[in-house]
Image (cartoon, rainbow, N blue to C red):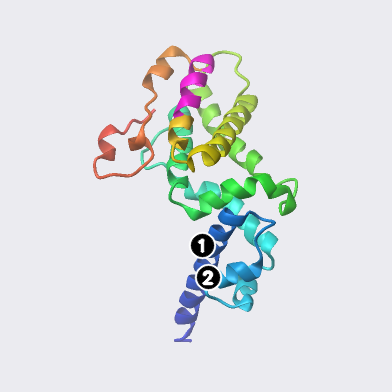
């Protein structure tokens, strides 16, 4: 019994190493260019260790894609439109540093190879943004007649396109700027002027710092 916590801790470390290594390899080579052997080599573990935690490359790729939203947690509290903005900005900034988010950005183009029809990353993100937009609607931040579901898809599609072009042109360095451009262009078309005026953007909305709470807004 005394050895169980040690074994569990070791298993958790191995699992984390496998996920990290898989994310790095997927980000570099995509789904089709990645093998379990490459992941094992990068992680410094045996093939058996990988299959202990994940039954296949497909399952590992699916986990990385579907786990993306759990990693994107804005550092400042917010609701409605501000939270939708904060989520996309946090994603954009974290993608610069996170192998898992970079892997997700690469895998999204091949996700039909390893996800079922009900596990589409676009639908997942759209549903999350839709929740924020419905909250914004209840807070009267949106103009009358806005189709919240269509708008959420539009925002996710725009961010996905920005990620693709930013990756090709600057290695994602300017992705946060592109996401801010999306909001700057779209907000006046569907949000009431007072809500647009309250929206804050910038690095402080997405990256935790000692002084970040000074600019916190609760909408």
Percent across and percent down for residue 33 are: 67, 58
Contact between labelled residues 2 and 1, with CB atoms less than 8 Å apart: yes
**As drawn, is 144 to the left or to the right of 77?**
right
Could you tell me which residue is drawn at 71 percent across and 52 percent down? 115
> Is residue 119 shown to the viewer in this render?
no
Please rate how many residues cluster around mark 2, counting C-alpha atoms within 10 Å: few if below 14, some from 14 to 19, many from 20.
many
Nearest the camera: 155 or 141? 155
> Is residue 21 shown to the viewer in this render?
yes
**As drawn, is 190 to the left or to the right of 212?**
right
Q: Which mark is residue 20?
A: 1
94 shown above or below 147: below
93 shown above or below 216: below
Could you tell me which residue is drawn at 66 percent across and 45 percent down? 109
Name the residue that disc number 2 marks: 43
Percent across and percent down for residue 158 are: 58, 30
Q: Residue 63: which quarter of the image?
A: bottom right
Nearest the camera: 105 or 183? 105
**As drawn, is 216 to the left or to the right of 53?**
left
């Amino acid at each position: 019994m005394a050895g169980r916590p040690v074994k569990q801790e070791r298993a958790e470390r191995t699992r984390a190493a496998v996920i990290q290594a898989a994310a790095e390899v997927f980000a570099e080579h995509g789904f089709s260019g990645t093998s379990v052997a490459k992941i094992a080599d990068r992680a410094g573990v045996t093939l058996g260790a990988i299959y202990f935690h994940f039954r296949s490359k497909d399952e590992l790729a699916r986990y990385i894609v579907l786990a993306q939203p759990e990693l994107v947690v804005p550092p400042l509290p917010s609701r409605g439109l501000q939270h939708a903005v904060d989520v996309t900005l946090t994603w954009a900034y974290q993608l610069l540093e996170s192998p898992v988010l970079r892997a997700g950005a690469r895998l999204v183009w091949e996700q039909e190879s390893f996800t079922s029809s009900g596990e589409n990353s676009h639908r997942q993100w759209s549903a999350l943004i839709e929740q924020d937009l419905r909250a914004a609607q209840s807070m009267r931040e949106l103009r009358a007649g806005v189709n919240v579901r269509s708008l959420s898809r539009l925002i996710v599609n725009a961010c996905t396109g920005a990620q693709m072009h930013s990756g090709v042109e600057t290695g994602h360095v300017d992705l946060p700027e592109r996401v801010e451009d999306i909001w700057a262009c779209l907000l006046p078309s569907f949000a009431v002027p007072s809500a647009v005026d309250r929206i804050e953007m910038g690095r402080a909305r997405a990256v935790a710092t000692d002084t970040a709470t000074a600019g916190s807004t609760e909408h």
